[in-house]
Image (tube, helix red, strand yellow):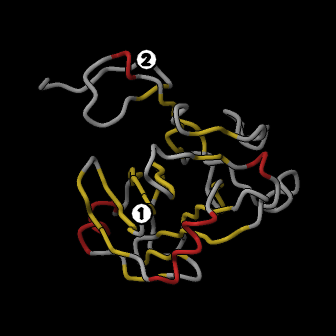
Amino acid sequence: GASSCTSCPDGTVSSAGSTSEDDCTDEQRPTCSCWTRECGYCSNLDCAVKQELPKPHVGIEVEVSSRVTMKKYGTIVMFDEDGNIISRLKWSRANLVVTGCFKCNTPAPLRKASKGITSTWTISFKDGVLMVKMKGEVMFENKMPKACDSIFAKFKYFGFYNMDCESTYTYKPLEMTAGNAMTANCNGNCA
C-alpha cells in the first residue's frame, strides 16, 4: 500500500485510504439548514440529499465538519421517500441522540477530541449500528435497539437543521443526489 494521502484539487476530497487523484470525486458542501421558509421548515425535499449506500447496506453515512459544543446540537433530519420526518440524529459534546430510538452520553474520548475546534465526524446509522469516526478511527459504536428498525426501513433522504454556514458535509456523487436548494451557497442563504 501507499504511505501518503491523496492531494486533491480545491473543493474536492477523496475517501479515506485513497491513493489516487482519480478518487477526488467527493465535494465539501455547506450543511444548508432545512429550517427556512423556502424549505417549508424541513418539509421540502429540494432541501435534502437522497442517499443510497452501496448494497447491501441500509441507512445513512455522512461526514460532517462543524464546531461541536456541549449545549448546541448539530442535527441531521431523516426523511422517508414522501418527505416526512422519521427521526433526527443529533450530536453534541454532551449527547448522541436518535429521536424515538436512542440517547446516550457522548464518550469522553470523542468529547475531548472535539473540544474547542471544528472537528470532522463521520456519522453512520446503518445496518442497525450507530457509529462515529474521527480520521478513520472508531470513537463510538453501538448496536441500536429494535425500536430503531422502522427508521432504517423507511430512510431515503437526509437534511440538516440548526447548522451554520461554516459547517460542511462531504457530498459523494456516487451515492448521493442533492436537492435543488442544496447549492454551494444554500440557495442564497449563505453568502
Asked if residue 126 is positioned above or below residue 144 in the image, the reply reads above
Which residue is disc 1 drawn over? Answer: 127
**Residue 158 horizontal side relative to residue 47, left or right:** left
Disc 1 marks which amino acid?
A: Asp
Looking at the rendered image, the quarter that the C terminus falls into is top right
**Residue 100 horizontal side relative to residue 82, left or right:** left
Q: Which element is circle 2 on?
A: loop
In this rendered view, identify the residue nearer to me: 166 or 129.
Answer: 129
**Residue 117 horizontal side relative to residue 83, left or right:** left
Residue drawn at point x = 26 percent, y = 63 percent: 139
Asked if residue 110 is positioned above or below residue 34 in the image, the reply reads below
Asked if residue 132 is positioned above or below residue 191 in the image, the reply reads below
In this rendered view, identify the residue nearer to me: 17 or 55.
Answer: 55
In this view, the mark in front (2 or 1) = 1
Which residue is disc 2 drawn over? Answer: 9
Task: Count neighbours of disc 2 (C-alpha within 10 A) and say few if under 14, some if 14 to 19, many if 20 or more.
Answer: few
Looking at the rendered image, the quarter that the N terminus falls into is top left
In this rendered view, identify the residue nearer to me: 167 or 154.
Answer: 154
Disc 2 marks which amino acid?
A: Pro
Residue drawn at point x = 77 percent, y = 44 percent: 189
Residue 114 in the image, given as x and y percentages of width and height: 34, 60
In this rendered view, identify the residue nearer to me: 109 or 24.
Answer: 24
Quadrant of the image occupied by residue 73? bottom right
Residue 35 in the image, given as x and y percentages of width and height: 76, 60
